[in-house]
Image (tube, grey):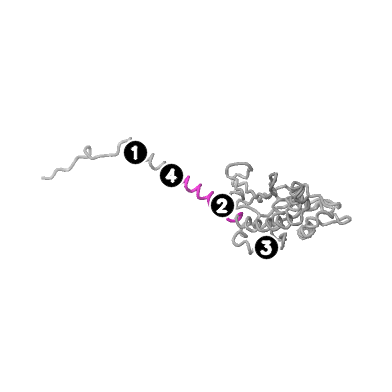
Amino acid sequence: MARYPSRQQRHAFTLIELLVVVSIIIVLIALSAVAIIRFGRLGPSQATIANMSKIKSTLDGQWAEVTRKAQDTATGGQGNPVAKLNAVNRQLDQAFPTSLTEVLAINAGTPNNQPYLNYLQSFGLVPGATSGVPNTDVSSIPPEVQSAICLMMILERGPANRAVTPDQLGSSGALTGQFTVTVATASGTQPVTLTLPYCVDAWGNPLRFGRVASSATSPRTYLIQSIGADQKAGTADDIFSNNL
């Protein structure tokens, strides 16, 4: 006659075994959470890198063309290479402004800025003018927004006849930011809402555009920066165009 184990003889999980199982589950949940967080960060980072790479490709062509023409026309001669380099850098500064203040400072020495001034007028950023100089105070516009506006303006108006359209930048046009700024004029202040296609990162931050000081023998270059998910400049998740 077969014998069956009594209730007392049947095996049950011990407290230690239960704790081990619970610990394994907790570890798996933690690993999954880390993977999800990393994936969430990776997506915007890759989108931002793709966007900045397309901008960089276009801007490289513009910058190289202006540099070449400036080197051909800059004065100074072989006897004074420093003076010639300074003349090249001045032309680069005029062709690639990084703030609205630079664009508004038009005079006989900065003829390249006139198309840019017209571009800003189309946005309503320079509604008035006195003696040919816009009667506008843009100092209240954050510097990072100013530099993003300048970047978009350079890409679309394009020095050296290298202008592009948002469609030419492909899927990066999906990255669009909207910013409301205040512009002061002689008649008072007015809000202006700006839509910046492809000149923002995937977190909605305006891309920061700046010129990098040249060496003693080379013309200056440029730098585009995304401040990343933490929205703080100078941290580990910043993305720079010179690393792409």
Residue under numbered circle 3: 164
* Residue nearest the observer in this picture, 215 or 75: 75
Q: Is residue 210 visible?
A: no
In this picture, residue 159 sits left or right of residue 202? right
Region in magenta: 31-52
Answer with mark 1 or mark 4, whichever residue precedes in sequence: 1
In this picture, residue 170 sits left or right of residue 182? left
Mark number, residue 44: 2
Answer with mark 3 or mark 4, whichever residue precedes in sequence: 4
In this picture, residue 141 sits left or right of residue 223? right
Residue under numbered circle 1: 18
Gap in Å between the C-alphas at discs 3 and 1? 64 Å
The spot of residue 93 in percent (x, y) is: 75, 51
Binning the other alpha carbons within 10 Å of mark 2 as few (below 14), some (14 to 19) or many (20 upward) gives some
Q: Is residue 20 above or below residue 197?
A: above
| Residue lying farthest to the left in this orientation | 1
Residue under numbered circle 4: 29
